[in-house]
Image (cartoon, rainbow, N blue to C red):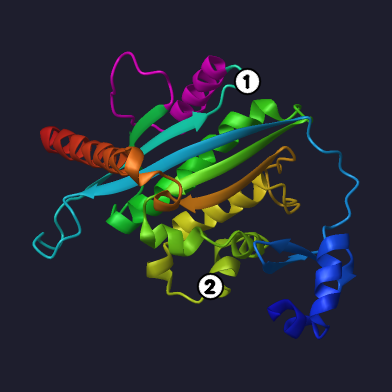
Amino acid sequence: KFAAQELGVTESAIRRACGNGILVGGNYLYSLADYSLILPKPPKTDAPSPAKTIPISIFCSGCSHPSDSVDVARGQSRTGGLAFQVFTDSSHDHAQFLQQFSIAAESCFGIRVPIEIDHDGSKLIAVFPLVNPSKNRCELKSCCDALRILEALLKSKRNEKETLYDIKVYTDSNYAWKLVKSKERLLELGSYFTSQEMLSHLDMKRHSVNIDILHPLIRSFNRLNGQIEPLESAHRAFDNAKVEFVHSMDGISRNKGGLGYVKSLKRQARSAAMWQFNREGNLV
């Protein structure tokens, strides 16, 4: 009934379209549990379908120390930490993939925090490398650096034309999620090459956006999604990957230890911030 009203046709026409795959108003209609789900017409493409799809999930978290609390004296030294962990399936050489991920991740950070000796390469904990490590900046930087790790990882896989890397980046940050949740918006903003151009098309103040982090995040996101790079860019787009962000709470099973895992990754990011805080204190 709703679809009939929206498209200006009879309900019987909607039912026939659902059953026979007929175009109505430029859309294909499908019946789903007594509801009409309107889907856009699939775009025509000459690109061949990938022979193999490899799913990659990377969870990221960031934290500052001391916390952004009113109890912390203004001007006090603060440090930040970042934590990442990647998951994939067994459709390819799992051990080799984790080794490649570990090498790529380590190449992206100058100061990394020691972790357990027998870890499998799926995890990396690092120090926030920029100035002003607030909670929001650390959380957004973890999203940015997750993409940076993925770019470093996939550079060696550009020739795998028959493989599609289907990537989901999970963030536990409500602040970062507001900025990265719309894939369409990120792709639109990615068309602006400089940070100033990008900032002029945002409806938020510079300090709340953290453009020094958001700009490279969006540019990296666009490259990983195959968007053509401007002529002045020194980078190349990827044609065998697609990426989207997901809030961690939407990507876990809360009754199977998922919430505990997300909290654990946050604790590891906090431990990195504390590790660096104590390290800087010992250098004074």
Q: In this picture, which residue range is highlighted in magenta?
A: 94-122
- Residue 2 falls left or right of residue 221: right
175 sits left or right of 38 in the view = left
The foreground one among 251 and 116 is: 251
Q: Does the magenta run of residues contain 108? A: yes
- Does 272 sit left or right of 177 as displayed? left
Q: Is residue 149 magenta?
A: no
Q: Quadrant of the C terminus?
A: top left
Q: Is residue 66 visible?
A: yes
The residue carrying mark 1 is 92
**Percent of width and height locating residue 190:** 63, 59
Q: Is residue 2 left or right of residue 151?
A: right
Secondary structure of the residue carrying tag 1 is loop
Q: Nearer the viewer, mark 2 or mark 1?
A: 1
| Separation of residues labelled 2 and 1 (CA atoms) | 40 Å
- What amino acid type should be assigned to the residue bearing mark 1? His
Q: Is residue 27 visible?
A: no
Q: Position of residue 139 (x, y in %)?
A: 36, 51
Please name the residue shown 78% across and 30% down the image. 51
Q: Is residue 71 above or below residue 64?
A: below
The residue under label 2 is: 202
Q: Quadrant of the N terminus?
A: bottom right
